Image: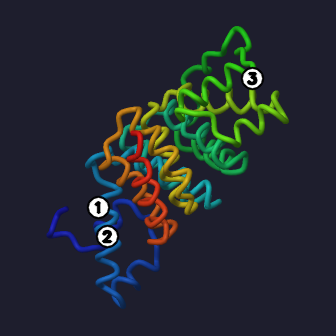
Amino acid sequence: MDELLDEATRAARWLPDEAWFPVLQKGHPAFAEGMARVGDVIAGDSALPGGYKMLFAAAIAAVKRDQRLVGHYLGLAAGEGVPYREAEGAGVGVLISRGVVPHRLLTEAISEVYGAPESDPVRATASPSADVQSSLDYFSRYFGFVPDYVELLANRAPVALEGYFLMREAALTGTALPAKIMELLLCAVNAAEYQARFVMIHARGARKAGATEEELVEACLTALPFAGVASWLPAAEGIFQSRQDS
């Protein structure tokens, strides 16, 4: 952190041009300084590159349905060198995590920020195969056991289980976004949604993919400006729980 820069100048590195921040700075300078310090962590290169954390912020903004913020943070991510294919991969992660509307908001912003891709994505020449047993084997490898909610699908809607497996595997390991970064993105999104259990699941996945606890903390802190300090409590709980069997 550059001690010569005031909190408004530092916040301008990652916040959009917000009229409320100078008002906050004038009326509540300690709060503004605190927010600027959080921004120093989430926007700067530290345990994680700042570009990835801005990509996480764009994903969170999409989940919060704020199109303007999606474009702002995606632009910062692109400016920090996050390539089109990795941003597109983040869209797939948002799709499996929070569904079609946040996915649409993020992919629309990707088109605006990056323009058309240089070439069409490589398409599979054959449909991927999946059956109930291979799906169960996948979840057993990922979790170390087959969760009860997976067993329920296997017993009551086996074709849906196969679809879930294909989507999950493709989202977590089948895009250009590195598996560790995808898991960290999903930690950030779930922190912003106050979902300690899902933070734990993806924190464990991130650890298996090589993430450090410092990277987990920085990823989850990305949620704080958009979901408040309340987001840090379930985030920390998920990180603590992920230490088990990691």
The reply to whether dot 2 and dot 1 touch (C-beta < 8 Å) is yes
In the image, which is nearer the foreground, mark 1 or mark 3? Answer: 3
As drawn, the label of residue 132 is 3
- Mark 2 residue type: Ala
Position above or below: 168 against 4: above
In the image, which is nearer the foreground, mark 2 or mark 3? Answer: 3
| Residue projecting furthest to the left | 4
Location of residue 148 by image quarter: top right
Q: Residue at x 49, y 50 (%)?
A: 200
Q: Residue at x 59, y 40 (%)?
A: 91
Q: Tell me residue 219's x, y (percent).
A: 40, 51
Pick whichever, 27 or 177, lies toward us: 177
Q: Residue at x 34, y 67 (%)?
A: 11
Q: Earlier in the sequence, mark 2 or mark 3?
A: 2
In the picture, the quarter occupied by the C terminus is top left
As drawn, the label of residue 36 is 2
Secondary-structure class at tag 2: helix
Q: Residue at x 50, y 66 (%)?
A: 226
Q: Tell me: 221 left or right of 133.
A: left
